[in-house]
Amino acid sequence: MNDIIVIVGPTGVGKTKLSIELAKNLDAEIINGDSVSIYKDLNIGSAKPSKDEMSGITHHLIDIKEVDEDYTVYDYQQDVRKLIEDITKRGKRIIIVGGTGLYIKAALYDYDFKKEEKKYDFSSLSNLDLYTRLKDYGDFDVHINNRQRLERLLTKCLNDSKNSNNKDKLLYPIKVIGLTCDRSVLYNRINDRVDVMINNGLVDEVTNLKDKYLVSRVLNSGIGYKEFYDYLYDDLSLDSVVEMIKKDSRRFAKRQYTFFKHQFDVKWFEVDFDDFNNTINDVYTYIKR
């Protein structure tokens, strides 16, 4: 089996473009590794590739769920493993690309998820208790007054902690490519990217989904969407929403770097934004070597 190429890095650093160009050269199919792009109708805020951008390359696990459907890390793990088997049998190379590190690691390593999650009774705990316990598992972007989300996140963390002790055991041969750049350059790119999303119609995209915010987990957790809740229901200004998205995206990029550096054996490449072909050629040379 050929190495699975895994392309990781923070938002806005060029992962999608690199994956498509590599897929052309390697006769590969691409598996999406972004948790928001899995959902239909979340196009602008997720920055998922358009049909034109895909350039005829087969992409998997994009637009497979409605926004009011649940899709877990366990579901992703099972779907990716089936795809790896299928694509390999057809003699194609595989590229996994995205910024949702836990999804990618769960698919490629020996994570033993239980399909039926254990339920927990948190009625005796205050919001502060829940918030404090949640911090033991990582830096989550959740407000202390959002009890429903606090309980949901803590339940997920408690169940995930029961995974196999072999979760650092790799199940497939992989090469992990990481894209990076100067932090100030990245933050400027993130800010500009949010402005482009607004100009491309993100507000209309969100407004058309307004009623589904009341039942959709992804709309209330995905960056670029969750920030609009108060705009839609509590009269928060659009300018405030835009600044929140930029801030949340920058914080998420920092968390992405931390996760990838600690959870994967990454070969990092400094992105040449002036001539991205240089980056493509450098990565391709490394893979072929």
Image (spheres, rainbow, N blue to C red):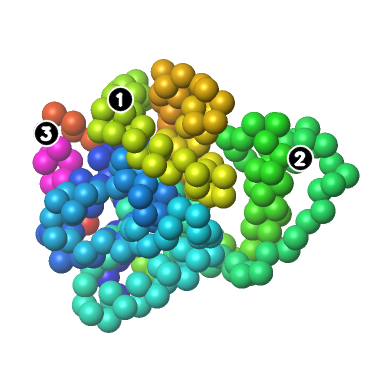
Q: Position of residue 223 (x, y in %)?
A: 45, 37
Circle 1 is placed at which residue position?
A: 195
Estimate the spatial distance between the alpha carbons at disc 3 and disc 2, rounded to whole Å. 48 Å
Q: Position of residue 231 (x, y in %)?
A: 49, 27
Picture residue at 40% right of the left edge, 75% below the top = 82
Nearest to the eye among marks 3 and 1: give it: 1
Q: In which quarter of the image is the C terminus?
A: bottom left
Residue stretch rendered in magenta on the structure:
275-282
Circle 2 is placed at which residue position?
A: 130
Depicted 168 relative to depicted 12: above or below: below
Nearest to the eye among marks 1 and 2: give it: 1
Picture residue at 25% right of the left edge, 33% below the top = 200
For label 2, the SS is helix
Badge 1, how many Cα within 10 Å: few under 14, some, many 20+? some
> Looking at this rendering, what residue extends furthest in the bottom direction?
89
Q: Position of residue 126 (x, y in %)?
A: 82, 37
